[in-house]
Amino acid sequence: MVSGIVFDLDGVVYKANYAIPGVAEEIARLQKKVKVLFLTNNATKSRADYVRHLEKFGISARKEEIMTSSFGAAHYLREKYGEGKRVFVIGEQGLKDELALEGKAVLAEEGEADAVVCGLDRQISYEKYERALSHLLAGAAFILANADPTWPKKSGVAPGSGAIAAPLIFASGRQPDFVAGKPSKYLIEKLLGMHSILPSQSAFVGDRLDIDIRMANSVGMTSVLVLTGISKKEDVEAAPASDKPQIVLESAAGVGKALGI
Ligand SMILES: [Mg+2]
């Protein structure tokens, strides 16, 4: 019996600013029956931003019910390196907010840095790359919010956090010391742990085989692929066993029925 359902956001609940039909209504129905949680690799917003963002789509959620790679990267920074670390950020306001709030970090635009934290940054510049590179070459910790190559737009895709980080990896010759986002287990284990839900009693609903489904399978959740985002039906056939979903649905609007809820 499933007692918790975790939804990915981009490509599952919405695409950019366009709601996927019927999903908000299904989430409202499920919220009366099971614990509904949200987990996104998107690091451009904080958890508080997501509460407001979901409201625009008619979904009510508390901050504690939302896990983002911005929160995860900040949480990891504090957990691993302690409070008060000087951090150079390539990323947007949501990532900076979580690093200050959850990571208890000092945002260091000038001077030395203990860590470089990188996420999606739609204002990326050569100058930011130069600064980040100098910190990495000087030995700063290298933390990536997520390694997604792309993220889905209403039609097509745009370069993601992993693509933003690629020039730093190439130029420094270093791999990131830590990647918070899916398919790493870090975010999902934190989120389920915070709500005392066992992976075996929960389902994950995502749109990417190599990210969402791989993560769900690796922790033993029921894996549900929806076809409203990146991965297509024909990709399922070609996927390795680690990335094969247990359930494939046209849309997350049908997830309750598929899980018998
Ligand atoms: Mg997605």
Image (cartoon, rainbow, N blue to C red):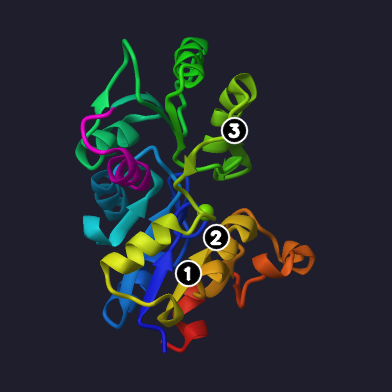
Q: Amino acid at mark 3?
A: Ala
Q: Position of residue 256 (x, y in %)?
A: 44, 81
Whether label 3 touches label 1, CB < 8 Å? no
- Marks 1 and 2, how far apart at CA: 8 Å
Q: Nearer the viewer, residue 141 or 161?
A: 141
Mark 2, residues whose alpha carbon is within 10 Å: few (<14), some, or many (≥20)? many
The residue located at (37%, 30%) in the rendering is 92
Mark 1, residues whose alpha carbon is within 10 Å: few (<14), some, or many (≥20)? many
Whether label 1 touches label 2, CB < 8 Å? yes
Q: Is residue 59 left or right of residue 188?
A: left
Task: Look at the image and say whether residue 245 sits in the magenta stretch.
Answer: no
Point out the tag, 1 or 2, that comes first from the N-terminus. 1
The residue located at (32%, 10%) in the rendering is 111
Q: Residue 33 is drawn in which quadrant?
A: bottom left
Res 204 label: 1
Q: Which range of residues does the magenta coloring cover?
A: 72-85
Q: On the image, numbered disc 2 is attached to which residue? A: 212
Point out the tag, 3 or 1, that comes first from the N-terminus. 3
Res 139 label: none
Up the image or down, 37 lies above or below 17; here it is below
Q: Amino acid at mark 2?
A: Asp
Q: On the image, numbered disc 3 is attached to which residue? A: 163
Q: Is residue 79 left or right of residue 160?
A: left
Indicate if the residue with disc 2 has its beta carbon within 8 Å of ligand 1.
yes
Point out the tag, 3 or 2, that comes first from the N-terminus. 3
